[in-house]
Amino acid sequence: MTDETPRRLSFTDHPASVGETYLEHMGVAFSFGGRLLVAGLACLAHGVFPFLFTKTGSRTVGELHERMVANRVRHGARAAGRETAEAAPHR
């Protein structure tokens, strides 16, 4: 047997790592998910009717990517400081 304890599931670790509370993170994730669902439906329609939604999927992915990168930059200093401290060797 090992003395390792199982990793505790946390609803706040990841949101905190990106500078958000649990509820803020849920809102952002729901927003991204909703946009992706709509874009996915547009892509399915485009597959059947190639003259419809010719740029919807790629435009949505690009906009969401930019939004995610902007969020990282906005919260990056706080998260980067934490990551640097965690990655540094302990003395």
Image: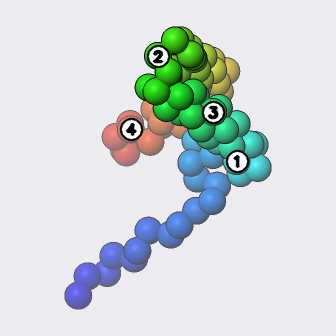
Which one is earlier in the sequence, the residue at label 2 or at label 4? 2
Residue 39's x, y, as percent? 58, 28
How crowded is the residue under tag 2: few (<14 C-alpha within 10 Å), some, or many (20+)?
few
Distance from the alpha carbon under mark 3 to that under mark 4: 39 Å
Three-letter code, disc 3: Val
Please report the residue visible at 53 percent of the width from the left and 67 percent of the height from the top: 9
- Residue behind mark 3: 38
Compare residues 78 and 55 and report the one nearer the observer: 55
Q: Kindly identify which residue carries mark 4.
A: 87
Q: Calculate the distance from the C-alpha at mark 3 to the C-alpha at mark 2.
A: 17 Å
Sequence-first tag of 1 and 2: 1
Q: Give SS at disc 4.
A: helix
- Check disc 1 and report the residue beneath it: 26
Picture quadrant where residue 7 is located = bottom left
How would you rate the neighbour count of disc 1 (Cα within 10 Å): few for under 14, some for 14-19, many for 20 or more? few
Tell me: residue 2, above or below residue 68. Answer: below
